Image (cartoon, grey):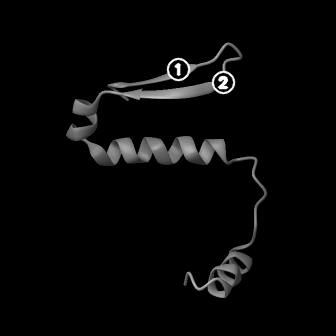
Amino acid sequence: MKGVTILKDEKNNKKILQADVSEIAKNPSKFEDLIDVIIAEERKDEKKILWETAKKQLKKTGKI
């Protein structure tokens, strides 16, 4: 994406997202999509739970 740079550490791990604010202002939804992809990539190895289990937990805590 134009105006976005991802900086990596010495082990080639993504560490810093540098973004040109003027480019974000031109197309904020595209930037939001990029952030969503980065978050999804970061969470790909997390333990997964079934939707029904998550829904029960959210109801139990009063969040839905």
CA neighbours of label 2 inside 10 A, class few (<14), some (14 to 19), many (20+) = few
Give percent across and percent down for residue 36: 49, 48
Question: Please, which residue is most extreme toward the top here?
Answer: 10
Task: Pick the quarter of the image with the C terminus.
Answer: bottom right
- Relative image position of residue 51 (x, y in whole percent): 68, 75
- In this picture, residue 57 sits left or right of residue 31: right
SS category of the residue bearing label 1: strand
Name the residue: 63% across, 86% down.
59
Relative vertical location of residue 30 with respect to residue 17 in this rendering, above or below: below
- Element at label 2: loop
| Alpha carbons under labels 2 and 1: distance apart | 8 Å
Q: Residues within 10 Å of mark 1 (few under 14, many from 20)?
A: few
Give above or below for 57 relative to 36: below
Image location of residue 62, percent across then percent down: 59, 86
Q: Tell which circle, 2 or 1, labels the residue nearer the N-terminal end.
A: 1
Tell me the amino acid under the disc marked 1.
Leu
**Amino acid type at mark 2:** Asn
Q: Where is residue 8 in the image (x, y as percent from the top left)?
A: 59, 19
- The label shown at residue 13 is 2
Image check: 47 left or right of 33? Answer: right
Pointers 2 and 1 in contact (CB under 8 A)? no
Give 60 or 25, whichever is nearer the viewer.
60
Locate the N terminus by quadrant.
Answer: top left
Instruction: Tell me where residue 57 sits by quadrant.
Output: bottom right
Determine which residue is flagged by label 1.
Answer: 7
Q: Is residue 31 above or below residue 6?
A: below
